[in-house]
Amino acid sequence: MRYVMGIDNGGTGTKAAIYDLNGYMVAQARQDTCVISKRSGWCERDMEELWEVNCNVIKEAVRLSGVCAEQIAGVSFSGHGKGLYLWGKNGKPVRNGIVSTDSRADSIVKEWDDNGTCDAVYPYINQSVLASQPCALLRWLELNELESAERTQWVFGVKDYVRYRMTGQANLEMTDFSGSGLMDLTTKKLSPKVLALYGLEGWEHCFPDIIDSTMQCGSITKEAAEATGLACGTPVAGGLFDIDACAIAMAVTRTDQTAVIAGTWSINEYISSSPVTDRSVKMNSLYCIDNYYLVEESSPTSASNQLWFLRNFLQEAAQVNGQNLYDYANELVLQAPIDEACITYLPFLYGGCDDASARAVFMGLEARHSRADVVRAIYEGVVFGHRMQIERLKASRTDEMKQIRLAGGVVHSPIWVQMFADALGMNVEIIETDELGALGAAMCATVAAGIYDDLVEASSQMVRVGTVYYPDWKRKSIYDQKYAQFYRIHQSMRSQWSLLHAAEGEK
């Protein structure tokens, strides 16, 4: 019997999972990676630690599965988009990797907005320029760490870096790189014109060749086999931007479907045969199915807010109650009536939906409010952040939004998923797997290994819809009122964030 493995490198941890050819998970392993924040807005990770974590979870997944390594027909990777992982001319990482929640380059993007650079590159990249994209981070390095720029051999995304360590073959993968702010989406190539507009001409030689998601791009080396327990020579596929991996693992193959990923980032997306070029949405990128684009609204405003609050304010209370931290949080939400607390939370710990300088806000706190009221406000704030972006996607579509498929950490909380259904007023479907990113990557491995012809066939064989959540229309009317207040507060805070950002810049 044959199997495939997918490895997903997210913003906070790495997961490896082994699947049979029907998409059933045989075993999985996970390990968190330490996020290093030396200054406000910085989010980094040690690249050598990241490599060791990948080796550890692969080895553990193989051990837990009881599968012989030679039975694994192929391996592939998914990973967070944006961010920056530099490999040096000396055969070592140049510096810490930069994670997609990093906002250090926000001032550079603001300058590009002011001087017309963002307008000039838009016809090529068809996306808003973000502080966490490689284009902005590379410019930041030139201005602040020139020695890092001079020592760089290859520019990678996170999964491309890990795949390079596994195979020794340097490549950029199409879906991931198309969200970098550097690709011409028409030619599907690195654009020298765009590099010149950013002032990044000196980096052109640092970008390896671009490959497709399902293309075999090397195999597991002897050294990687020893470190991971995989068989030397196992084929490795290009892999996926994690938003593509989750979408294809939710069998998003039609234009009337919408994928919502509520994890470290808020990702809301649908596929289209053409990009949306009127600038009404934030991002267009290449989808993993030929001749389709992924139309996306995204921001670092999702379930990471819950994780922050739980770790910093609820751990001790959960231990006293003898409960799992997440179960405790869900119980607290149920204790807070939906129509009483009236606290509004803007989930902007790592920047906002439109402005990297935005910061989180609790509005309406009173002495009568409890811990439960605050936790409910965080859950609702995350949902409303998604809704704000989904409303934009609805306005950009030429067809009706018929179906929401939800993924990410929130799917482990039925209470939170029901909140999504109620606040959006739509049926919400959950896929029968715990690790969509890893499954999407594994599906690429099946195509590279010749098991399935393409990702559409792989999704038809490996994806199953599980629970469906239906909206409660009474709660929907309450959430509509709460969302209206959320939106008003969001709009009113814009000027305050600008002042705060200016004050921080003077320190």
Image (cartoon, helix red, strand yellow):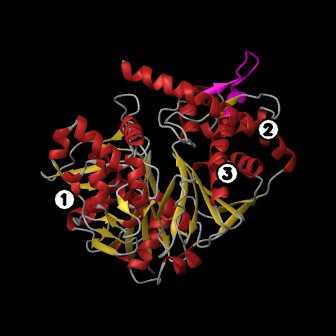
Graded by Cα atoms within 10 Å as few (under 14), some (14 to 19) or many (20 or more), the crowding at tag 2 reads few
The residue segment tinted magenta is: 360-377
Whether residue 322 is visible, yes or no, is no
Mark 1 or mark 2, earlier in chain = 1
Residue 332, picture quadrant: top right
In magenta segment, residue 322: no
Give coordinates of residue 487: x percent, y percent.
68, 37
Circle 1 sits in a helix, a strand or a loop, which is it? helix
Residue 139: image tag: none
Task: Tell me the amino acid under the disc marked 2.
Answer: Gln
Circle 3 sits in a helix, a strand or a loop, which is it? helix
Nearer to me, 224 or 430: 430
Lateral position of residue 478 relative to residue 154, left or right: right
Query: How far apart are the alpha carbons under marks 1 and 3?
Result: 40 Å
The residue under label 2 is 481
The residue under label 1 is 205
Graded by Cα atoms within 10 Å as few (under 14), some (14 to 19) or many (20 or more), the crowding at tag 3 reads few
Nearer to me, 241 or 237: 241
The residue under label 3 is 391
- Seen at 30% across and 51% down, the residue is 197
Query: How far apart are the alpha carbons under marks 1 and 2?
Result: 53 Å
Task: Tell me the amino acid under the disc marked 3.
Answer: Glu
